[in-house]
Amino acid sequence: MRWVADHRKHHKFSDRDGDPHSPWRYGDTIPALMKGLFHAHMGWLFDEEQTSQRQYAPDLLKDEDIVKISRAFPALVAVSLLLPAVAGGLWTMSWQGA
């Protein structure tokens, strides 16, 4: 849900003040643009200032299934990373297979 809220806010404020992942955030010098490039691609994920889900994704907050999936996200990530390694290890009975 956070990604959707950020994405909707991004489209509302594309490359202007308020855009959560604008490459122009730090200015237009080469160092500022390099910092902005990092921020635009992944730095915004670690930004302390979170986009309001109540404001930009109220429809998702009302959907019980989406809320459950959102809450289960860390477990889903863990399973999607661990399950293939366990299967590969059991299939080959080796650490290399894992």
Image (cartoon, helix red, strand yellow):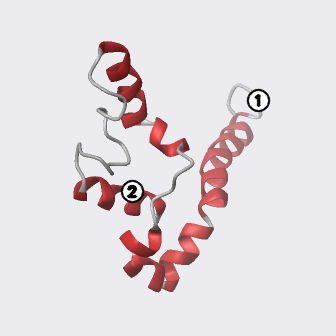
| Image spot of residue 24 (x, y percent) | 29, 32
Label 1 environment density (alpha carbons within 10 Å; few <14, some 14–19, many ≥20): few
| Image spot of residue 13 (x, y percent) | 25, 53
Residue 49 versus residue 46 in the image, above or below: below
Residue 53 versus residue 21 in the image, above or below: below
Looking at numbered disc 2 in the image, what kind of residue is underneath it? Asp
Circle 1: element type: loop
Total labels drawn:
2
Q: Nearer the viewer, residue 45 or 14?
A: 14
Do tag 1 and tag 2 residues touch (Cβ < 8 Å)?
no
Looking at numbered disc 1 in the image, what kind of residue is underneath it? Ser
Q: Is residue 20 left or right of residue 2?
A: left
Q: Is residue 67 left or right of residue 33?
A: right
Which residue is found at the position 37% from the left and 15% from the top?
31
Residue 56 versus residue 83 in the image, above or below: below
Residue beneath disc 2: 6
Which residue is found at the position 77% from the left and 34% from the top?
93
User: What is the residue that sits farthest to the top in this orientation?
Assistant: 30
Residue 68 versus residue 72 in the image, above or below: below
Q: What separation in Å lies between label 1 and label 2 (alpha carbons)? A: 42 Å
Which residue is found at the position 29% from the left and 17% from the top?
29
| Image spot of residue 33 (x, y percent) | 32, 22
Residue beneath disc 1: 94
- Identify the image quadrant of residue 4: bottom left
Q: Is residue 22 left or right of residue 78?
A: left
Mark 1 or mark 2, whichever is nearer to me? 2
- Identify the image quadrant of residue 32: top left
